[in-house]
Amino acid sequence: MKELFLNVRENVELVKGVTKIKFFCANLPEFNPGQFINLTVGNFDGVLLRRPISVFRHDPAAKTFEIVFEVKGKGTTFLSRLKGGDLPATVFLGNGFTIPESAERVALIGGGLGCPPLYSVAEKYAENGVKFYSYLGFSTESRVILADEFQKVSERVAVATDDGTFGEKDFITNVFKREFDEIRPDLILSCGPAPMFKALKALNIPVPTFISTEARMGCGIGACYVCACATLTGNRRVCTDGPVFDIREVLL
Amino acid sequence: MTYNPLAVNICGVDFKNPVIAASGTFSFGFEFSKLFDIDRLGGIAVKALTREKRDGNPGPRIVETYGGILNSVGLQNPGIDVFIKNMTPFLETKKTVVIANIAGSEEADYCYMAERLSDVGRVSIIELNISCPNVKKGGMAFGIHPSDITSITKAVKRYSKKPLMVKLSPNAADIAANAKAAEDGGADAVSLINTITGMAVNAETRRPVLKNITGGLSGPAIKPIALRMVWQAYNAVKIPVVGMGGIMNAADAVEFMLCGASAVQVGTANFVNPLNSVSIVEGLKKYVEKNKLRNISDIKGQLITD
Ligand SMILES: Cc1cc2nc3c(=O)[nH]c(=O)nc-3n(C[C@H](O)[C@H](O)[C@H](O)COP(=O)(O)OP(=O)(O)OC[C@H]3O[C@@H](n4cnc5c(N)ncnc54)[C@H](O)[C@@H]3O)c2cc1C
Ligand SMILES: Cc1cc2nc3c(=O)[nH]c(=O)nc-3n(C[C@H](O)[C@H](O)[C@H](O)COP(=O)(O)O)c2cc1C
Ligand code: FES
């Protein structure tokens, strides 16, 4: 990890309330898919904490990477309005996803803003011949993001919405369950809201499953212990022991 | 060797500068050492140690409020044995002063840990944390009434071969009396302030934001209170006072020293930017040059009040 200034190169609204920013930095450290950054969101005006955001896409040759985030409060509103300039950030934090050599068929199960970090995995490993099966769930049509991007790196992309306005009207975990026997994944990676993780755990599928969790953070680098994830072995730090944990370990 | 105008001595311990990382925001220094050379800091106060490993409170454990943060970590730490076995080898490779912050549920816990740490070479000062607002038993309970402060300080002092710095709680009626009580108990220094108990509520869900309901407030929002308390403590005791609470930059650090602090601790600022503590050291260097001071401690207690 490094403390760096990130130069804002592009800022686009993907759908209403969801922004994509591209950053450039000449000396980015090594990146492992599933890692995040901890980003300054203003010159002190009552806002102190940085905001953790996952990396969506990484281009080491161009020395750029992109993030995709939902505008929720003060911090993400600030970010969504950026047109240029440099932002201090601690870059490439957490463990990220591990793809064992033996993995050939990987299911990605994303919920809403949990989809971007999963894309970073497929982007890197599809080139090496790993097959990806992407299951993306959203609340409604106007929230659907990145489906086209996932098409390019996946054998199959299924989209579901809670209200049926786009794709199937179902929870994406149910769609995945129906197709499980057909795709026979040897690894499942997931990122999304807690209820999705619960549904996934309830499927009781005997395939290694790893989930990327969230917690409110202080330092983002492992030094303050505020980002607790309750696990079978006690509270662990989302920012350094995670954000990716084995679903069996996490107390959901 | 050239003279170092930032060097300070607190209860017999030499610090290369008066900037110390505050307990609980810096773990044991390992993580921050990946981002900068922690030997550039005067010292580090490690995360509060307890006799046994503790898991802390359930999350969420942090929330940002205007100009501050509330935390309810609740002393999560690996326990004193793991600290001595696994963390001190790393600290051996560093030269910055190590302050061991200790907390417990009973007086005996504090005494036990002070005795153990007395034999740990890398620990130069023991910081008695009787001011943690996030645990049900012990913690702050020892740090509210002057008589309790004197008695626990006296007890721990008997077991400690290292200088003892008593960390005072702002959740107290009379900070001057509490500082004096620590001095009466034999404290070699006092540090203040720990966090101020507070709450954050979500109007929509009608719930507290922190799972623990209450938490400790830190950051710029508490600086005026911290300055006032450091000033009052400084005027009440002869032992050194280490000041903290909302220090974000070198000017803030100078303000604390003007109010009587011999050194300062920096906590929340480490989250705003992990390089802030070293920026403060650099800023103090400039302040000394600009004001043609022989040593930074020349400004200690030099608040002009006429
Ligand atoms: C490891 C990690 C990766 C993330 N990746 C993404 C991503 O790729 N895209 C995306 O849209 N969101 C992501 N999030 C969530 C994102 O951090 C929050 O939406 C954001 O911090 C909200 O900030 P705000 O100031 O707009 O909202 P506010 O509600 O005003 O924030 C107040 C405080 O709460 C914290 N907070 C609020 N929601 C969350 C949350 N869900 N998780 C952690 N802290 C929170 C904020 O950081 C801030 O300190 C991620 C969170 C984590 C922990
Ligand atoms: C996340 C967090 C954890 C803390 N943990 C401890 C602790 O373990 N022991 C202690 O004495 N103080 C602890 N503190 C208090 C700080 O050391 C410091 O006294 C307080 O935050 C005020 O300084 P600041 O405004 O610079 O942060 C903690 C503070 C924070 C924000
Ligand atoms: S955010 Fe500080 S330890 Fe995880």
Image (cartoon, grey):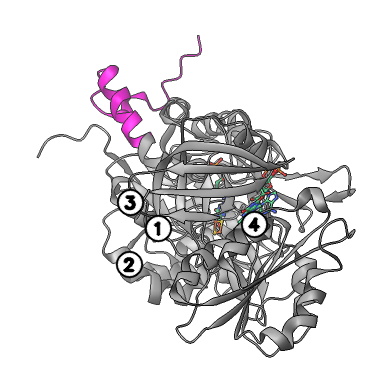
Residue A210, image quadrant: bottom right
Amino acid carrying mark 1 in the image = Gly
Mark 1–mark 2 contact, CB under 8 Å? yes
Q: Are marks 1 and 3 in contact (CB under 8 Å)?
A: yes
Which residue is identified by label 3? B38
Label 2 chain ID: B
Q: Which secondary structure, mark 1?
A: loop
2 and 4 marks in contact (CB < 8 Å): no
- The span from disc 2 to disc 4 (Cα, nearest Å) is 48 Å
Location of mark 4 (residue): A148
Which of the two residues, B181 or B282, is positioned nearer the viewer here? B282
Of residues B214 and B209, which is closer to you in this image?
B209
Q: Is residue B127 magenta?
A: no
Q: Amino acid at mark 4?
A: Asp
Rendering coords of residue A176 (x, y %): 75, 77
- Closer to the N terminus: mark 1 or mark 3? 1
Question: Label 2 belongs to which residue?
Answer: B90
Q: Are marks 1 and 4 in contact (CB under 8 Å)?
A: no
Quadrant in the rendering for residue A108: bottom right
Q: Which mark is residue B29?
A: 1
Q: CA distance from mark 3 to mark 2?
A: 12 Å
Which image quarter is the N terminus of chain B in?
top left
The image's mark for residue B173 is none
Up-down relation of residue A59 to residue A179 (above or below): above
Q: Secondary structure at mark 4?
A: helix
What x and y, as percent, mark residue A152? 57, 63
Residues shaded magenta: B280-306
Q: CA distance from mark 1 to mark 3?
A: 7 Å
Label 1 and label 2: CA atoms lie apart by 9 Å
Label 1 residue near ligand 3, CB within 8 Å: no
